Image (tube, rainbow, N blue to C red):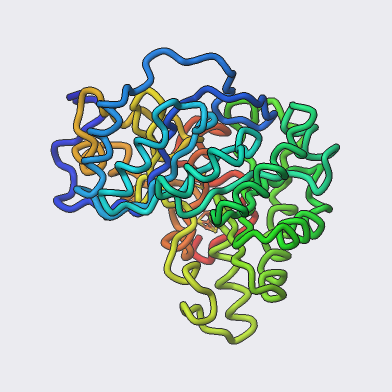
């Protein structure tokens, strides 16, 4: 066990793990300009083998009943992917997958279904092939993803569309939503760009704190116009804005009015969510590359329960700057990855929040 990453005085009971993103492989056939992993198509050394991967799955129920996101890289490039999904499904875990869509065929769409995947998320960052392919870095990616979605539909696999917010696609959001609706997506999740990996080179694509505020307010209003499930992901202050707006509108923040958003928190990294890399490194999330331990040397439940980084993220009093005194801290928390990349301290205040806490 790595004593640097584990704290003997950790709290007795860690929160339940609700969601785990597992990078089953880092290899990928695309070269997206915002890729956290800066992935390439060749195999990466040190990836978990099948036995290690199955053992990891065995440990998930020991820390909660998490939804398991099989992600990458491109998860379909892992040869034993369906064996692993079937195994996790047989353990009673809800399994979802995040393929890029370009490698889905009529055949593997059926395997996605029969292995137990309950939903696929496909990333679409522009409403047209030209706009999407530019960000994805591969001409033809849009058309291939569209074909992949059709194969999923034919196989009876539910899908959602994920969109990363950049300066370039900010004014095309309505068009991207319309595309998602017309395709038959069950949900549309928007992601805020986090400046890590290849995304760090996209400085000109970062939106400002003001634009961030505007897009989340737009999202709050737009959500009311559709029955489709909309979610702002890795946009922690949406949970603050939702409460501010609801208060102005005299609406209670209840499950009836806001669905699961009423019960959740902005950033769940290390609190109800974690990321496991292709080599088994456990992190608060894919964008926050803190080494919390490696499942090859330390059992995953031990890492989840006693990593000092996780314990720091769970301790509200440890947060600094505005986030440390903010009355919305419990429901927001700020993006720890953005704080880390932009200031070097993952407990520092969220750099892209324009809110001034009441308490000075
Ligand atoms: S730190 Fe939290 S909000 Fe930021 S990218 Fe990670 S999980 Fe998302
Ligand atoms: S100051 Fe921090 S905790 Fe408060 S709303 Fe902004 S990001 Fe969230």
Q: Give 193 or 110, whichever is nearer the viewer.
A: 110
Q: Residue at x 54, y 14 (%)?
A: 42
Q: Is residue 265 positioned above or below 191 on the image? A: below
Q: Position of residue 61 (x, y in %)?
A: 23, 49
Is 31 on the left or on the right of 182, as rendered?
Answer: left
Q: Is residue 257 positioned above or below 59 on the image? A: below
Q: Give 224 or 91, whichever is nearer the viewer.
A: 91
Q: Is residue 151 visible?
A: yes
Q: Give 86 or 319, whichever is nearer the viewer.
A: 86
Q: Give 170 or 107, whichever is nearer the viewer.
A: 107
In the image, farthest residue toward the front: 107
Is 330 on the left or on the right of 227, as rendered?
Answer: left
Q: Position of residue 198 (x, y in %)?
A: 64, 25
Q: Is residue 323 visible?
A: no
Q: Position of residue 107 (x, y in %)?
A: 56, 39
Q: Residue at x 47, y 49 (%)?
A: 113
Instruction: Place residue 7 in its image quadrant.
Output: top left
Q: Residue at x 59, y 87 (%)?
A: 250
């Amino acid at each position: 066990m790595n004593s640097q990453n584990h704290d003997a005085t950790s709290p007795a009971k860690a929160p339940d793990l609700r969601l785990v993103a597992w990078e089953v492989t880092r290899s990928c056939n695309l070269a997206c300009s915002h890729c956290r992993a800066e992935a390439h198509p060749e195999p990466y050394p040190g990836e978990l083998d099948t036995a290690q991967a199955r053992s990891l799955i065995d440990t998930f129920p020991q820390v909660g009943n998490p939804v398991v996101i099989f992600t990458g890289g491109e998860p379909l490039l892992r040869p034993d992917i369906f064996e692993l999904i079937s195994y996790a499904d047989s353990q009673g875990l809800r399994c979802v997958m995040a393929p890029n869509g370009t490698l889905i065929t009529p055949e593997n769409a059926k395997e996605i279904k029969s292995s137990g995947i309950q939903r696929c998320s496909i990333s679409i960052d522009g409403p047209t092939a030209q706009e999407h392919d530019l960000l994805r870095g591969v001409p033809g990616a849009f058309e291939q993803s569209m074909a992949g979605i059709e194969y999923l539909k034919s196989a009876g696999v539910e899908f959602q569309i994920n969109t990363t917010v950049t300066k370039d696609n900010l004014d095309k959001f309505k068009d991207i939503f319309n595309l998602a609706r017309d395709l038959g997506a069950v949900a549309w999740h928007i992601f805020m760009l986090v400046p890590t990996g290849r995304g760090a080179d996209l400085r000109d694509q970062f939106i400002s704190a003001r634009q961030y505020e505007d897009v989340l307010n737009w999202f709050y209003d737009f959500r009311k116009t559709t029955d489709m499930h909309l979610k702002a992901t890795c946009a922690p202050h949406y949970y603050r804005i939702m409460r501010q707006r609801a208060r102005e509108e005299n609406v209670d923040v209840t499950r009836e009015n806001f669905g699961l958003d009423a019960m959740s928190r902005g950033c769940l990294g290390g609190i109800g969510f974690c990321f496991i890399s292709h080599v088994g490194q456990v992190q608060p999330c894919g964008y926050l590359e803190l080494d919390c331990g490696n499942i090859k040397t330390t059992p995953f439940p031990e890492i989840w329960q006693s990593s000092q980084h996780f314990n720091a993220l769970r301790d509200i009093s440890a947060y600094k700057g505005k986030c440390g005194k903010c009355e919305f801290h419990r429901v927001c928390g700020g993006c720890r990855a953005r704080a880390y990349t932009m200031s070097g301290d993952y407990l520092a205040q969220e750099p892209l929040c324009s809110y001034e806490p009441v308490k000075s």
